[in-house]
Image (spheres, rainbow, N blue to C red):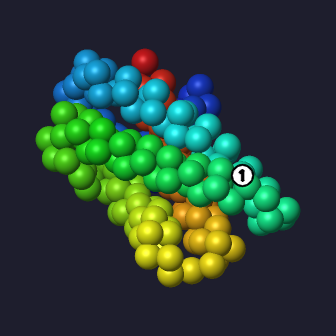
Amino acid sequence: MTIASTNTTGAQSLGRRLYSDAERARRDATKWTLVQGLLAPFQFVVFLISLVLVIRYLVTGVGYEAATLSIVIKTAVLLLIMVTGAIWEKVVFGQYLFAPAFFWEDVFSFAVIALHLLYVFALLADAFTPVDLMYIALAAYAAYVINAAQFVWKLRLARLDAEARL
């Protein structure tokens, strides 16, 4: 979605609305919006803790088990937010995934999930060294940060759209 113009108050307006009036009403009425609003910052905290543990292991060689557990927990939270996010999209947009308003975020989410699951499968298969596993986790985390930024940007666009319509 592109920003098309600036209104007289200086706020930028959208070339295309993120939500129709009906979609906005469904978004505001569903409990899934609250669920997503709680899970997203929780996932970010889990990510930060895990990132510290992974880096600690890579730097010191200490704490492999804690880092590994944190990555598995981060993966579980990611899968939970993906499932609940799909339910949210169904309620708001009428389809579980790839609603036009969040198409590219959903596409990239699958890459994030794939990298996280690659880590889990490689861990279970004992296919890589512990250090290699941590680098897979870091790649998954880098993708997660990009994906999170996509969603934060969309949240910002939705707020700009709402402000422009006041």
Query: Is 69 or 99 nearer to us in this picture?
Result: 69
Q: Nearer the viewer, residue 134 or 45?
A: 134
Q: Residue drawn at (50%, 47%), measured in percent from left and top? A: 73
Residue located at (79% from left, 59% from top)? 62
What is the residue that sits farthest to the left in this orientation? 94
- Splitting the image into 4 quarters, where does residue 141 fall? bottom right
Q: 153 above or below 67?
A: above
Q: Position of residue 16 (x, y in %)?
A: 35, 46
Where is residue 107? Give x, y as percent. 36, 63
At x 35%, y 56%, the residue is 106
Query: How many marks on residues?
Result: 1
Q: Residue furthest right?
A: 60
Residue 25 at x, y percent in the picture:
25, 22
Q: Label 1 neighbourhood size at 10 Å, few (<14), some (14-19), many (20+)? A: many
- Which type of secondary structure does the marked residue at label 1 adopt? helix
Residue 152 vs residue 79, the one in the foreground:
79
Looking at the image, residue 9 lies above or below residue 122? above
Q: In the picture shown, does residue 15 fall above or below 10?
A: below
Would residue 55 be found to the left or right of residue 99 on screen?
right
Q: Is residue 18 visible?
A: yes
Q: Position of residue 44 (x, y in %)?
A: 58, 41
Residue lying at 56% horizontally and 51% vertically, measured from the top left: 69
Q: Mark 1 highlights which residue?
A: 53
Q: Nearer the viewer, residue 125 or 133?
A: 125
Q: Quadrant of the C terminus?
A: top left
134 versus 29 height, above or below: below
Residue 15 showing in the rendered view: no
Q: Is residue 151 left or right of residue 94?
A: right
Amino acid residing under circle 1: Leu
